[in-house]
Image (spheres, helix red, strand yellow):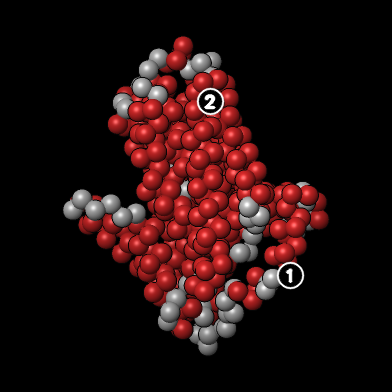
Amino acid sequence: MTSDALVTSPLGVLAILLASIVVAELLARYRTMKKLGAALIVIAVGALLANLRIIPPATSGNPVYDFTFTYVISGSIFLLLLQVNLGALRRAGGQMIGAFALGAVGVFLGVLIANAVIPLDDMIGDKSRALAGMFTGTYIGGSANFNAVAVAMDVTRDGGLYTATTVVDNVMTDVWILIALALPALLSRTRWFRAVVSSTATAPSQQAVAPQIDHTPLSGTLEIALPLALASLAVWLSTMVSAWLSARGVGVPSVLIVTTLALIAAQVPAFSRLASAHTIGLWAVYLFLAVVGANADLAALAEAGQLTPMLFAYVTIIFVIHAVILIGVGALLKIEPVVLAIASAANIGGSSTAFVVAEAEDRHDLVLPAILIGSIGTALGAYAGFAMTALLR
């Protein structure tokens, strides 16, 4: 697909994306921008660059975007998990699974309500049932389920409808990632969560449960080269093993394999003490977020005509019901705001976005639970999507 962007070469796009990370980091140091954080800023900068057509939107296709979504985020997961504290799982795992289940219930009910309120039947006929399944699948377990339902229900054959739905999904997912990143701070200020925040503040500090990183006596070159080599090897192996298993009828997402490899490597002291691994992994996360921002191609929505506002309203209803159930019941169950935010990100965006929220909050103890519940969502989302299409028949 061609693009009218100012810069289209992969090297040029990569250079601009890396520059946007620098800009976000510098802006986050100012008092007025500090509360937003670099993660929020880099998404906004990526979206601005794409919509001003300085770089092409991610929907136009570019090797940099494909490589980032396929390999960079997996490599960052590996690097950041090298220092994970497995003992922290006992404290975080139960709450995280409960919050994720609440969010999934909210999505399912939200789709039912949106389908009843928004008259998509009048515009696209029986395809509205397919869209309900697509949105159910993607907002319980990520975009892989969106496409699985779309292919099965022949929505991909309707190019205009599929494109409009995909762009709306991308834009609204980006919006929700921004909300999820801001949610812990927002909820912590409300009276419903003050008691929860106070109790966690008196518990052992996050630094106590996070790993203590000792610098290794490696040379500067090895300190950078070793984690990059390990991450590249892990991502390559996970991709190969996942493809090999898939060819034999066993579907295991590569993110689960790379997570397993990271946990094995983390048991080797020489690897777990690599201080640079966290820095490189965080840089990769920011590159991923810049590409996520570039996914929000607002110009493409104009081509869908009257269907566009209807789809936005449809997804807005889903998100509102999801948030009401997750936050409302979460407050009653005294679940930490950051856990609710991570669970919500796992529902709406999958493992990658959940993991990003955990890292942005500097909650190393929640990184692994975030990835695991995202993987659960990926496994269950397609089933939920097809169940929705059957329910609406």
Residue under circle 1?
A: 202
Name the residue located 49 percent from the left edge and 23 percent from the top edge: 115
Residue 74 screen position, x and y as percent: 43, 58
Going 18% across and 53% down the picture, which residue do you hit?
Answer: 248
How crowded is the residue under tag 1: few (<14 C-alpha within 10 Å), some, or many (20+)? few
Residue at the extreme right of the image, as rendered: 31
For the residue marked with disc 1, what is the amino acid? Thr
Q: In which quarter of the image is the N terminus?
A: top left
Tell me if I can see residue 151 in this picture: yes
Q: Residue furthest front?
A: 332
**Residue at disc 1, secondary structure:** helix
Quadrant location of residue 138?
top left
Q: Is mark 2 on a helix, strand or loop?
A: helix
Q: Tally the marks.
A: 2
Quarter of the image for residue 335 reads bottom right
In the image, 216: left or right of 253? Answer: right
Give the class, few, some or many, for how many residues have Cα within 10 Å of label 2's Cα (few <14, many ≥20).
many
**Depth check: 48 or 182 in front?**
182
Residue 114, disc: 2
Left or right: residue 63 versus residue 180 is: left
Residue 324 vertical placement versus 302 (above, below): below
Amino acid type shown at disc 2: Ala
Q: Is residue 24 visible to the viewer in this orientation of the structure?
A: no
